[in-house]
Image (cartoon, grey):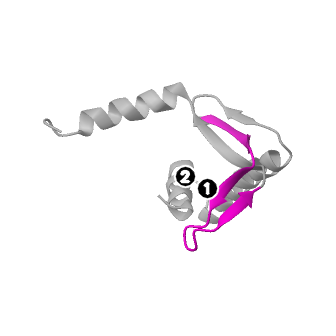
Amino acid sequence: MTKADIVDHIASGTGLTKVETEAVVDGFIQTVIEALKEGRNIEIRGFGSFKTKKRKGRMARNPRTGEQVQVDEHFVPFFKVSKDLKSTVNENLKRKQPAGI
């Protein structure tokens, strides 16, 4: 599902125009990005939480040349799915799965 698909789905369900809905979706995404850039966490109950994780520096290997390179410590964005969402998705997909798989 793309951002355009999400905008279409929300617009059809809310009665907002696609332009208005896209502004809301863009605003949400930008809010998440800004919060993570500032080191803050975002928790949406029943959905999940956005956080940053610190990765230690390490020695890595360039796969093309095989050369050893130093990777400095860095931060990566991380999304942790809520237990509610995880169980809902799992149960729904189990029901749709054909028998014998």
The answer to whether mark 2 and mark 1 are in CB contact below 8 A is yes
Residue 76 horizontal/vertical position (percent): 71, 49
Nearer to us in this view, 41 or 73: 73
Identify the residue at the far front of this view: 67
Nearer to us in this view, 46 or 13: 46
Quadrant of residue 59 within the rendered picture: bottom right
Identify the residue at the far right of this view: 38
Classify mark 2: residues with Cα within 10 Å, few (<14), some (14-19) or many (20+): some
Residue 72 horizontal/vertical position (percent): 78, 54
Give the amino acid at mark 1: Leu
Q: Secondary structure at mark 2?
A: helix
Res 79 visible: yes
Between the C-alphas of marks 2 and 1, the distance is 8 Å
Residue 6 horizontal/vertical position (percent): 53, 56
Verify whether residue 51 appears in magenta. Answer: yes
Q: Earlier in the sequence, mark 2 or mark 1?
A: 2
Q: Main secondary structure of the magenta part?
A: strand
Verify whether residue 34 appears in magenta. Answer: no
Q: Quadrant of the C terminus?
A: top left
Classify mark 1: residues with Cα within 10 Å, few (<14), some (14-19) or many (20+): some
Magenta segment: 48-71
Residue 7 horizontal/vertical position (percent): 56, 58
The residue positioned 52% from the left and 26% from the top of the image is 83
Q: Secondary structure at mark 1?
A: loop
Identify the residue at the far bottom of this view: 65
Res 21 visible: no
Q: Which residue is mark 1?
A: 16
Q: Which residue is mark 2?
A: 10
Residue 91 drawn above or below residue 5: above
User: Residue 90 bears which disc, if any?
Assistant: none
Q: Nearer the viewer, mark 2 or mark 1?
A: 2
Identify the residue at the far left of this view: 100
